[in-house]
Amino acid sequence: MPLAIAYLPVLLAFLARLALVGLFLPFSALDKVLNFGAAVGQAGQAVASPGLARLLIFAGLFVEVVMSLCVLTGIADRAAAVVLAGYCAVTAVLWKQFWRRPDFRLRGPSQGREVFWDFMKNFAVAGGFLAIAWGGTAGGVAGFLHAPLASSRPYDVRVP
């Protein structure tokens, strides 16, 4: 078997994970660094204290960088994927509050509906991370609960 074909499954597994974390690393993390003041301003909409808003941005930056690297490398990737799933859910609830928009409509122009779709996309990404964490099966959930810090061994090429 040619070497390129032998490594194709590893490359595809890596690219799938990269597509999932690419939203966070490098893009969202870099945006937080380059536009720190704006990020703190946005976080300030959820909390009253500027210090707490800065702390939220630093925590978000840590999650986006470190957990994404864990998912990519396979080091404690299942636990990292659960953390990223939670991060997606929390950010949806804090910053994608479609129910607070006065113009939420099912037909016609509506910023509320646009925010609703962003809210749903956050939960879809969370589902993708949970699929990594649990392998998409009930047995995977049980395995995660048994050893949450174990690697999913994403680049193991054994055929089941």
Image: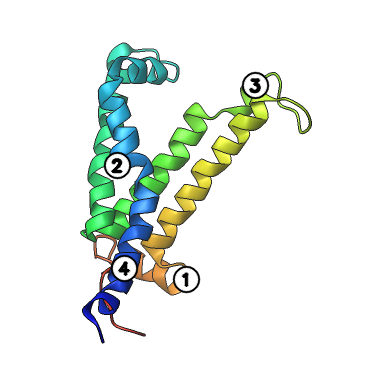
Q: Is residue 122 above or below residue 43?
A: below
The crowding category of the residue bearing disc 3, from other C-alpha atoms within 10 Å (few below 14, some 14 to 19, many at least 20), is: some
Q: CA distance from mark 2 to mark 1?
A: 29 Å
Specify the label residue 25 is tagged with.
Answer: 2
| Residue matched to label 4 | 146
- Residue type, numbered disc 3: Arg
Q: Give whichever of discs 4 and 1 has the lower sequence position.
A: 1
Question: Residue at the spot x=38%, y=14% of the render?
Answer: 41
Residue mark closest to the camera, 3 vs 2? 2
Residues at marks 4 and 3, CA–CA distance in whole angstroms: 42 Å
How many neighbours does mark 2 have within 10 angstroms: few (below 14), some (14-19), or many (20 or more)?
Answer: many
The answer to which quarter of the image holds residue 4 is bottom left
Residue at the location (47% across, 48% down)? 125
Q: Secondary structure at mark 4?
A: helix
Find the distance from the CA under tag 4 to the CA under tag 1: 12 Å
Residue matched to label 3? 101
How far, Cα to Cα, is label 3 from label 1? 38 Å
Q: Secondary structure at mark 2?
A: helix
Quadrant showing the C terminus: bottom left
Label 3 and label 2: CA atoms lie apart by 30 Å
Q: Amino acid at mark 4?
A: His
Picture coordinates of residue 39 (x, y %)? 35, 21
| Identity of the residue drawn at 29% across and 82% down | 158
| Relative depth, front residue between 2 and 102 | 2
For numbered disc 1, what is the local secondary structure?
helix
**Count of labels shown?**
4
The 10 Å Cα crowd at callout 4, few under 14, some 14 to 19, many 20 or more, is few
